[in-house]
Image: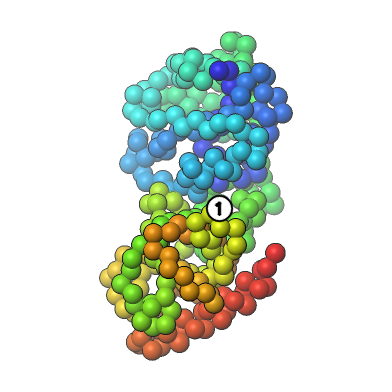
Amino acid sequence: MPTALALGSFDGLHAGHRRGIEAICRNPAGGIPTVVSFWPHPREVLHGEPRLRLDLPEEKLHLLEPLGIHQLVLVPFDRQLARLSAAEFVDQILLGTLQARHIAIGANFRFGRGREGGADTLRSLAEAAGVAVSVLPILEDPVGRMSSSRIREALTAGDLTTASALLQRPYRFQGEVVQGRGLGRQLGWPTANLQVDGRKFLPGLGVYAARAWVDNESQALPAVMNLGPQPTVDPGSPSAVEVHLLDTRRELVGRILQVEPVERLRGQQRFSGLEELSAQISCDAQQAKERLQDNAG
């Protein structure tokens, strides 16, 4: 069926991305409003660079629907696709397979073999076939250009306020709760150990005040989260996500926990022993309660 396409990575769905989406929803030209992205990221295939995503495909679907998008198309990116010229990409993929009637891109969008095509190329090729093209200028704010990189930088620094402002929504991730070693329970601070999709971009290491949701329940539960290794108990352990629900005890193994880090409380520390660690967790829990109360609503 004919489509109206917003074409790009749309990772994070920041204000710049939303302008492209608005363009095709406002003027769909008789096509289904559709977001088109590549999966995996072209740099993963061409340069072997792992690219963690702010939004995984299943998360992006839920974010796009309220914006008026009816479908998300992930074009499989491989070396065969990378060899297509700009003209072949437009003819075979955009006009042929996707039946585009209107295309929206950012001014810096590149496509085709060796990134040979740009906005002018697309406009020339598409409009020759009677397809409208909207080229959106790069959006800037007083700090600089709106980009997914800025969101990643804020998250890496543990700056959830800036990240959420750029995303125009709270940053969240989820994972299945798996069986841990039970050390937190022995200390009196049982934690849910999350198995998070390895393709998901996570904030910088540290301890956070957080909110959590169990499965599809609507009630947000106050929590404190540790993201990173365990420098006191096992300095060689891999980075992990551990969430302690405040003022509630529930059996969570096998459940899905969605987490919204709200504020970074401190960085990773190594303590003299389990007694000092337990005392610090108590301080972290109290501080998390206070921060979450301050951030309520």
**Crowd tier of the residue under label 1, counting other residues whose Cα lies within 10 Å: few below 14, some 14–19, many 20 or above:** many
Q: Picture coordinates of residue 45 (x, y %)?
A: 35, 36
Q: Picture coordinates of residue 246 (x, y %)?
A: 53, 75
Residue 88 appears in the rendering: yes
Give the side of residue 162 with respect to residue 84, left or right: right
Note whether 175 is above or below 23 in the view shown.
below
* Residue occupying image coordinates x 70% and y 24%: 27
Q: Nearer the viewer, residue 46 or 120?
A: 46
Q: Picture coordinates of residue 133 (x, y %)?
A: 63, 22
Colour mapping = rainbow
Note whether 42 is above or below 215 in the view shown.
above
* Residue occupying image coordinates x 54% and y 40%: 61
What quarter of the picture does the N terminus occupy?
Answer: top right
Q: Quadrant of residue 33?
A: top right
Q: Picture coordinates of residue 48 (x, y %)?
A: 33, 41
Q: Quadrant of residue 120?
A: top right
Note whether 186 is above or below 174 in the view shown.
below
Q: Which residue is mark 1?
A: 151
Residue at the far right in the pictured view: 26
Note whether 283 is above or below 124 in the view shown.
below
What quarter of the picture does the C terminus occupy?
Answer: bottom right
Give the side of residue 34 with respect to residue 75, left or right: right
Residue at the far left in the pictured view: 236
- Under mark 1, the amino acid is Ile
Q: Quadrant of residue 227?
A: bottom left
Q: Nearer the viewer, residue 205 or 135?
A: 205
Q: Nearer the viewer, residue 95 or 88?
A: 95
* Residue occupying image coordinates x 41% and y 45%: 51
Q: Nearer the viewer, residue 139 or 211?
A: 211
* Residue occupying image coordinates x 27% and y 70%: 236
